[in-house]
Image: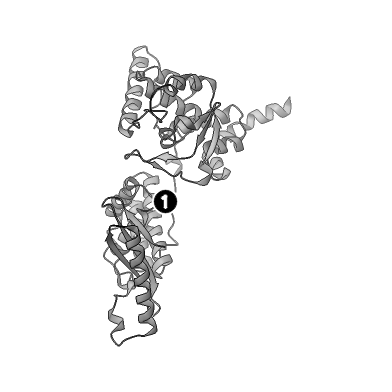
Amino acid sequence: MAIYKDEKRGTWYCKVNYLNHDGKLISHTKRGFKLKRDALNYESSYRVEQYQKIENPTEDMTQVVEPVKDMLFRELFDKYIENKRHEAEDYNVNKYIQVAKRFFGRVMDIPMSKIKPSDYLDCRNIIESEKAAVRYRNKAIFLLKSVSRFGYDYYELKDHARLLKIVPLKSTEFREKEVWTPDQFKLFIEHVDHYVYKTYFTFLYYTGMRRSEARAIEKRDIVDGVVSINKSMHQYSGEFKSLKTNSSRRKIQINQHVLEMIQPLMETEGHLLFGGNEHLSSTSIQRYFSNGIKLCNEHLIARGEKPIPKIRLHDMRHSHATFLINKGANIVAVSKRLGHSDINMTLKVYTHLLKENEEHIIDLLDD
């Protein structure tokens, strides 16, 4: 079934992919249905109509649809984006569009039947030459490869971008992740004067949860000192959404300090732990976080002390994992606590910490 809800318009639409009499994959979309069943009925009748045409071909059959392979790369990209809107947030989809506008001009107006591997290579080289972070440029290359693969999977187009390589990270460009030690976090949290946000940041630091997961925690999700992570929250709309992966669904224990901090919030009105009846907005969270760092560092500098690093909010999660690993926590347990889908993901991010612990292992052996 290819029936979807158009959230912006409040209507339903269907997408039908089928092979025509020449064996070419055709994509047909019909919008504007007020009810889901209307879209289902249309899809069913449309498929029957196409099957009948294949069984009883007419002379002008080739004029029913335009061959998909004549579409431009721009049109394929639009279809890719339309499909992505069903599985990704609008915020991320809009980022894809911005990346394409910046980097994909070289291939946008080339017909897919004429596009060559060298066209993708030229586009990739343009991306590499741009002045942008390596991670951002590689996102652009991955997007280019994804669109090409999408054309291969759904429209029988050749995947000429499959061989493109990512931009290598030079040793001079490598940066260790910035994290806070517990002492640095304590210096920061003293300068957050709103209790709800103070508790929210403390919750993030001592649980390692993603910010969207913590925003979605309901009071009923916390039982006997254990929090069940079973959903996250849309960055802007405040609506619940499913977790990134199945492994993100997990239960983790909360330490005593955090349990004591959230107790007053548990006794307030509303179902949400943070905000009660109203979710915490992303902009307010970022404002309190940035302002807390600013006030903290102004205070430290005035006393002639070293300021704390200006980390990202997501780095609270890295700080949590770094603290646990440095204290000798089992890497498998850390991976499960973070909700990683694969322990290799945890190893990839925190390998440098494990190498640092090698000296500790030697000390244990010597003892």
Q: Quadrant of the C terminus?
A: top right
Q: Mark 1: which amino acid?
A: Val
* Residue 170, quarter of the rendered image: top left
Mark 1, Cα crowd under 10 Å, few <14 / some 14-19 / many 20+, is some
Label 1's element?
Answer: loop
* Residue 262, quarter of the rendered image: top left
Circle 1 is placed at which residue position?
167
Q: Is residue 157 visible?
A: no
x then y, percent, for residue 278: 33, 31
x then y, percent, for residue 330: 62, 33
x then y, percent, for residue 235: 35, 39
* Residue 274, quarter of the rendered image: top left
Q: Is residue 24 above or below residue 170?
A: below
x then y, percent, for residue 313: 40, 32
Question: On the picture, is 347 further left or further right than 237?
Answer: right
Q: Is residue 201 visible?
A: yes
Q: Is residue 102 above or below residue 76?
A: above
